[in-house]
Image (cartoon, rainbow, N blue to C red):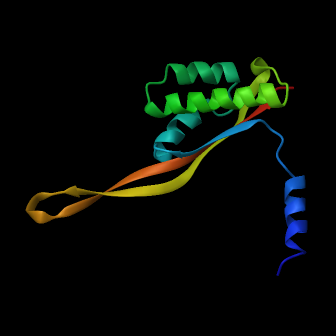
Amino acid sequence: MAKGHRSQIKRERNANKDTRPSAKLSYARIPVQKACFVLDAIRGKSYVEAKAILTYNPRYASGVILKLLESAAANAENNSGLNKESLFIEECYASQGPIMKRIQPRAQGRAYRIEKRMSHITVILNEKN
């Protein structure tokens, strides 16, 4: 059962709000597996180093994640007053989004299903001490 009134539960949840600067991209037309190849390369790196890695990475996902990283850094600068050079990537992950199902015609009247996967990508930054 619930531990109180709905408004009380919401108030407690919002009190524990994460204050780290972050950016989230929902419904990115990139499969989670392909996004994770790029995210694994930049996890734990400094902002400047991660930006350099993403700039010269040939994968399609790197361009999308670079834009997301710059958005998170701008959020840190404008909302928290942090310096971009002192930031590093504390967390970055991709979670499964909806799947668009399409049909591919095949021989002898058959139809194969094509699944166009989407993902929700999140980048969370923090300041080095």
* Left or right relative to 104: residue 40: right
Residue ranking furthest to the left: 108
* Left or right relative to 101: residue 40: right
Q: Please state, as top left, top right, bottom left or bottom right, where the C terminus lies in the image.
A: top right
Toward which corner of the image does residue 69 lie, by quadrant?
A: top right
Residue at the image position 79 percent from the left and 26 percent from the top? 78
Toward which corner of the image does residue 100 lie, by quadrant?
A: bottom left
User: How many labels sit on residues?
Assistant: 0
Residue ranking furthest to the front: 7
Comparing 14 with 1, the one in front is 14
Comparing 126 with 10, the one in front is 10
Judge whether 36 appears above or below 74 on screen. below
Toward which corner of the image does residue 46 lie, by quadrant?
A: top right
Comparing 61 with 103, the one in front is 103
Residue at the image position 46 percent from the left and 46 percent from the top? 31
Q: Is residue 58 visible?
A: yes
Q: Please state, as top left, top right, bottom left or bottom right, where the N terminus lies in the image.
A: bottom right
* Left or right relative to 71: residue 15: right
Q: Is residue 123 visible?
A: no
Residue at the image position 46 percent from the left and 41 percent from the top? 34
Residue 13 percent across, percent down from the top left: 85, 59
Residue 26 percent across, percent down from the top left: 58, 46
Residue 106 percent across, percent down from the top left: 15, 57
